[in-house]
Amino acid sequence: MLHLLGIISLAVAAKAQCPDYIDYSNVPHGPFSGGQYNLSYMRPDPACRTFNSSMVEQTVDRVSQGIADPDLRRLFTNAYPNTLDTAIAWHGYANNSDEELTFIITGDINAMWLRDSANQMQSYLPLLTASQAFDSLASLYRGVINLQARYILTDRYCNSFQPPIESGISPSPNPSASEDTVRPNYTNSSVFECKYELDSLAAFLEVSTNYYNATQDASFFKNYQWVDAVKSVLQVADEMMVPTYQPNGNVSELAYSFTRLTTRSTETTANDGLGNPFNNGTGLIRSFFRPSDDSTIFQGFIPANMMFASYLKSASDIMYAIGDQNDLAEQMCDLSESLRKAISNHGVVHTSTHGDIYAYEVDGYMSQNIMDDANIPSLLSAPFIGYLDRDDEVYQNTRSLILSADNPYFMRGPVINAIGGPHQGPGYAWPMASIIRIFTTDDEAEITQQLQQIVSSTDGLGLIHESINTFNVSDWTRQWFFFITGTSTGFGYELVKKCLETEGDKVVATARNSSKLQFDGATKDNFLAVDCDVTDQKSIDMAFDKAIAQFGRIDVVVNNAGYGLSGEFESLSDRQIRTQMEVNFFGLLNVTRKALQVMREVNKPCGGKIQQITSIGGQRGVPTFSIYCASKWAVEGYTEALNAELKPEWNIKLTCIEPGGFRTDWAGRSMVFGENKNPAYDHINAEEAMGKRNGTQAGDPAKGARAFWEIAKMDDPPLRTVVGSDAYSGIMNKIKTYGELYPKYEKLANSTDVDGYQRPS
């Protein structure tokens, strides 16, 4: 026993030394493939892998040897074992039981999605055989099925869940869900997010079917909670076939509703959480959300109904096999058959260009949404999920449409051509759709083309990204790492909040005394508070070093630290003037100098973005702010010149953000006034003027910070931009003034050239 405990303690110690894979996977590692794209090696050290399977390792070696292209070989080596390498957060037993449990995470969040965990296991289905060994793939599968059954019985309408209590892993806060209103109520201690998606329940039937078909292990399903979970799934199906209006016109009382306080329409539902009206008599099962976690427009979501019908029928074989459940099995078969009829009756639409096709969503009121999304289930994936044969005429018509410009979410460009979706928005294609395209064709030219696109679009990292900008291979879905100065108040504080509310963003927040920084949703995984004095280069270097040690890289540096100095020029002491320039200008230079080094050397070749928070006062002089304006004008000129010095291949983007008046603390207790009041300026009272203005500005700091965040996420951010309606009108007035002023003196300006001078072409 002591020997075993010693081995366990050594294993735990080894895991503690492992880098965060999210950070690790964003930086290239050797040995490189040596092919055209020289792809990075991305597997973690064997001691850091979350589950080791000799069968999978043998398969990786065997298949790799048969792949001639070095880049495709490397991509397969990295991607195929990735779930086992990185996502098996815990595999163990239920308390006081021999019930196996497997907790599989998606990305960096310690939460398990029903759909994602089923999909993640699907890669290993060809290797799945019957086995009672705890370290087998069969055990992993049983653990997933058991835990999914538990989750469904906990909250049958929810889509993602917290770690099982037996794992010892703490629940993860979900800031995005903090403003959710959901019926039925749930608790964050067991549920991570509660978006009802029909495909999540279909995924439970799918992973169950896959295990049974591969192992013929019917006895497993007699144990624990599988039958009860299926009954709960059928209960949801029954409850979600209720129309919006009863025959007498009354509004039906739905078992589920969902609203979220959000600025994204896809994150909430219409009609106070009920969704758009759904007609009676369709025979379809409603779905409030899609597999992308985006809300449906019309709740007759055809791909999910296809998937549910397919796996409901196949799972009925399990119910027949375990005995004493024939009535339940027949109920499953009957519902599957009725769904197929409903899809044929309401999900098929005639088009003039492509003939009869499947709609993506319908409502039973003759409204249809004609599109497809990359996430599975999709219309493209209908053969993949076993609903129909890929030679089916209506499917082929549908496939032709959704792989063309007639699909509003078919993305095209020089990098990749594939289906995307509203989750990442226009311009971003999902390689997942390219993979499903390969699975649904026999055309070798099409398969080769899709493989080429997948291999060439990894940005050299050798991993398949969620989505990719079709015009920029280096712009792909990933976590963003922000380094923000001056986060105690104002824009800096609000920007940290915005980043922490955004799934995937990580933040290094700096302040002179970072111990006072407190933010909701901050964890050791997404937040680091660091002391930083921007007037001290050593302090800056230490802050950056801590950030790199924690997160591996920095994508966006926001030079926000600074303050206002107000008063007529002659009231300002030499000390005040020099201190203003030291913080607002030289401090920004110091941070920028270090940021350039990190983005050029550590982030290579991805580079990064540097935001210089200047002011509209950096574009026009404002009375009583002469030195403040001088500090911001200096930043503007410095940044413009620096931008012209940078090599394009460094991929470093600079932006001067010029806010107008915002209701931050800048004009309040943070403001410094001239200490030597000059009686000659009795017509100016800076303190009185600022006192009247403070709190009446047009700008909302939270909205301003959101604008900073949106600029950071732009592919090609501008060198300059104003933020705030007053700043915009101010800069336009200045442009107009310049346009009127300089032409008046054109002759004078041009009169000073050397005689005979010819301007270079």
Image (cartoon, rainbow, N blue to C red):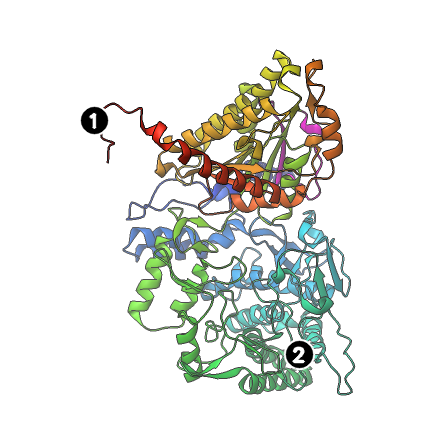
Residue under label 1: 756
- Report whether residue 542 is seen: no
Residue under label 2: 278
712 drawn magenta: no
Tell me the quadrant of the picture where the N terminus can be found: top right
Label whose residue precedes the other's in the sequence (1 or 2): 2
User: Are the residues flagged by discs 1 and 2 in contact, CB closer than 8 Å?
Assistant: no
Which of 606/140 is in front?
A: 606
Q: Position of residue 136 (x, y in %)?
A: 53, 58
From this view, report whether residue 179 is shown above or below residue 519.
Answer: below
Q: Which residues are magenta?
A: 513-535
Residue type marked 2: Phe
From this view, report whether residue 706 is shown above or below residue 278.
Answer: above
From this view, report whether residue 343 is shown above or below residue 4.
Answer: below
Tell me the quadrant of the picture where the C terminus can be found: top left
Q: Is residue 406 left or right of residue 425?
A: left
Residue type marked 1: Gly
Q: Regarding mark 1 in the picture, which secondary structure is present there?
A: loop
Say the numbered circle drawn on residue 651: none
